[in-house]
Amino acid sequence: MKTWISRTAIPRGFRFAATACGLKRQGLDLALLTSEAPAAAAAVFTTNVVQAAPVRLSREHLRRSRGRMRAIVVNSGNANCSTGPAGMVAARRTAECVAAQLGCRPEEVLVCSTGVIGVPLRVERILQALPGLARKLSNRRRSFHQVTRAILTTDTQPKWASATFHLARSRVHILGCAKGAGMIHPQMATMLAFLVTNARIAPGLLARTLRAAVHGTFNAITVDGDTSTNDTVAVLATGASGARVIRAGSADFRRFGHALEAVCHKLALAIVADGEGAQRVVEVEVRGARSKRDADRVARAIANSPLVKTALAGADPNWGRILAAAGRAGVPFDPEQAKVWLARIPVYARGRALPFDERVAHREMRAGYVPIAVDLGVRRGKGGARNGKQEPGRARIWTCDFTSAYVNINADYRT
């Protein structure tokens, strides 16, 4: 990922600012993203039953505003989750303060928080900082980069991505940033991500496009199998590109969807690469299943297996752990028909180990990107024919290895 964004990648109509308000011991911890005019908006949220006050309030605001937003305000250092009635009061007061600074309605503000669960939010620090933060808003690259840093918790680096494409003679830009390193499991998105674009698209169609983009990106990553209480992915679209309105089913719609998914994919892989204590990204592909759902269940079982992930940390070609994880996923298949590849090396087929050079496998597994592939060998249809990439029994999940650093980070996170 490049360390600095190009000036042209920032869509027109958006401004950014960040500051340190004292929620974290040090560093930036409060960010504001704004649209100069009401923007079409869409968001997806955590499916965890335990949901933070900002998540519940943002759902309400998105519904009340009918998908039209002016701002997203984000604090790090405190999740404002499981904090009783005071938590919702804090979230509402934050939205009201932002609205007062921008001259809009509180329901046109999305509120997001990330950090420790169960600790009362010192909202007065946010409220004191917001007027000055609003005065700092700009569309400069530096301001956007400060936002990417202000939303971080245990992350080791900011995460951002962009895409540009043409609709007729107009250029459409999509820019996004994300945070996430631990408590990452695909039950919606499992982190915070914010995207802005100058495309012209209705809120309903934008929501449909976002859900599709999230499905194969943020919903296809896992670090530790834990779903957060604060997960939010939000997108704002101003229409400032001057391009024609994007219509459902059109070529413009497909191009926009592909570009949005590309940005989400880059951000999702950046989260996995920055997994707490991680050394390498691991791609788990399962094919040859009866259905895509079956393939997905097996891929997730492998990707979330502590035994698989610790073997990956040591670059140990212990393929038996992969096969065992697949076998406990609750998906029927015949082990005699299954095949396993580790770092592109065939290691198992026909019910037994295949001969391979373990030293070579160990060397390949020390790379920054390690692919695992499993073919369950389930035949479907006439003659067992399959349809390549469109085959329903195929799924991909991205994860990372488990190192001792993960334990150290999470053992004393609060203290």
Image (cartoon, helix red, strand yellow):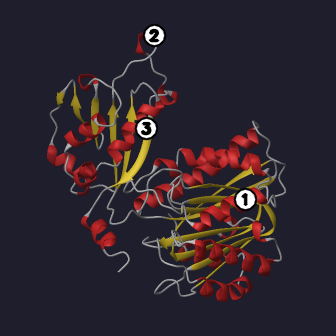
Q: Residue at x 82, y 51 (%)?
A: 169
CA distance for labels 3 and 2: 23 Å
User: Considering only vertical position in the picture, is 204 above or below 27?
Assistant: above
Eye-nearest disc, 1 or 2: 1
The residue wearing badge 3 is: 296
Using the rendered image of the protein, determine whether residue 40 is visible from the camera's viewpoint. Answer: no
Determine whether the residue tagged by mark 3 lies in a helix, strand or loop: helix
Eye-nearest disc, 1 or 3: 1
Amino acid on which the number 3 mark rests in the picture: Asp
Amino acid on which the number 1 mark rests in the picture: Leu
Amino acid on which the number 2 mark rests in the picture: Lys
Q: In which quadrant is the C terminus drawn?
A: bottom left
The residue wearing badge 2 is: 382
Q: Position of residue 120 (x, y in %)?
A: 52, 79
User: Disc 1 or 2, which lies upstream in sequence?
Assistant: 1
Q: Position of residue 23 (x, y in %)?
A: 52, 83
CA distance for labels 1 and 3: 31 Å
User: Disc 1 or 3, which lies upstream in sequence?
Assistant: 1
The residue wearing badge 1 is: 62
Q: Residue at x 28, y 27 (%)?
A: 338
- Decide: few, some or many residues near mark 1? Use Cα within 10 Å; few <14, some 14-19, many ≥20: some
From the viewer's side, name the closer residue of 304 and 389. 304
- The quarter holding residue 287 reads top left
